[in-house]
Image (tube, rainbow, N blue to C red):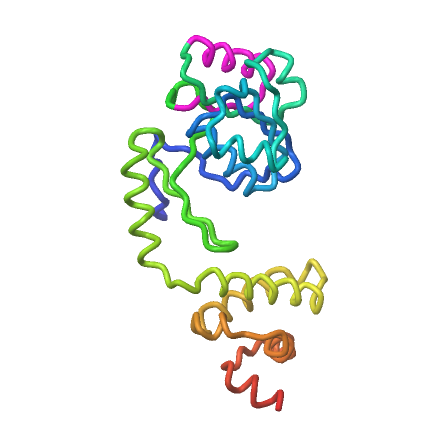
Amino acid sequence: MPEYPKVQGGGSLIVAWQVKNKHVLVVGGGEVAAGRILLALNADARVTVVCPSSGLNGEVAYRVAEKQVTHIDRNFEPCDLDTADMVLCAIDDPEASTQVWKLCKERRIAANIADVPPECDFYFGSIHRDGPLQVMVSTNGNGPKLASIVRKRIAEALPSNMGAAIENVGKLRRKLREVAPDIKEGPKRMKWMSGVCESWSLDDLVGMTEQDMDGLLSHYQSGDIPPLLEVRMKNL
């Protein structure tokens, strides 16, 4: 019998949730809410903040003043959920928070109630961001501070130019799809791109120009992956 990975229960399904142009409702306006708002804005979501003006901290007030978010100047009301795709609740009122949670469950809206793991459909991890690169560390709600420590150690181990390399690889992939658009080419495209990432150094990927990409792509049909120097010599 072949050996398969063992099931390790108790984890979370870690995914990259695409919320671009979706409506994220944030209940609260303090420090925790500010962090949640920034994460949602970084993901290009449409954010509405429900909180009396007196409860907004400096950062949230700034987001409101700059019109980065829509602000409803009052306490939460059930009608606020009418257009919400996701709810992030961060208020210092356990009873009110639980009410928000129950309403979200009734309407089947994904929600996160800050600091109350049993009332969360998902958790926020500690995130390292470098351009298109996002690395998240989650402790499944058990130790946020430890998640932050682990995330910092991972970030320190990564090359400083990793984000730039990923951006160039993304450009190369898009160009490759133009060169070989046929869906049947999918496995070959994946194998060839994997070969580029494995055979070229990080510095090569960072320094790759549009001309280098075009020169490299001319070798795709043959399946060859010449070194960057060879590609540039042929471009002369």
* Near-viewer residue (126 or 29): 29
Residue 19 relative to residue 1: left or right: right
* Near-viewer residue (187 or 40): 40
**Residue 184 part of the magenta-drawn span:** no
Q: How many marks?
A: 0
Residue drawn at the location 49% of the way across and 40% of the way down: 15
**Taking 102 as reference, is 15 above or below it?**
below
Q: Which residues are magenta?
A: 95-114
Residue drawn at the location 37% of the way across and 63% of the way down: 159
Residue drawn at the location 54% of the way across and 19% of the way down: 51
Give percent across and percent down for residue 191: 54, 65
Give percent across and percent down for residue 190: 56, 62
**Residue 109 part of the magenta-drawn span:** yes
**Taking 84 as reference, is 45 above or below it?**
below
> Which SS type dominates the magenta stretch?
helix
Give percent across and percent down for residue 131: 50, 55
**Taking 96 as reference, is 125 above or below it?**
below
Quadrant housing residue 12: top left
Give percent across and percent down for residue 204: 47, 75
Quadrant housing residue 114: top left
Residue drawn at the location 69% of the way across and 67% of the way down: 180
Residue 44 relative to residue 88: left or right: right
Which quarter shows the C terminus? bottom right
Residue 46 relative to residue 227: left or right: right
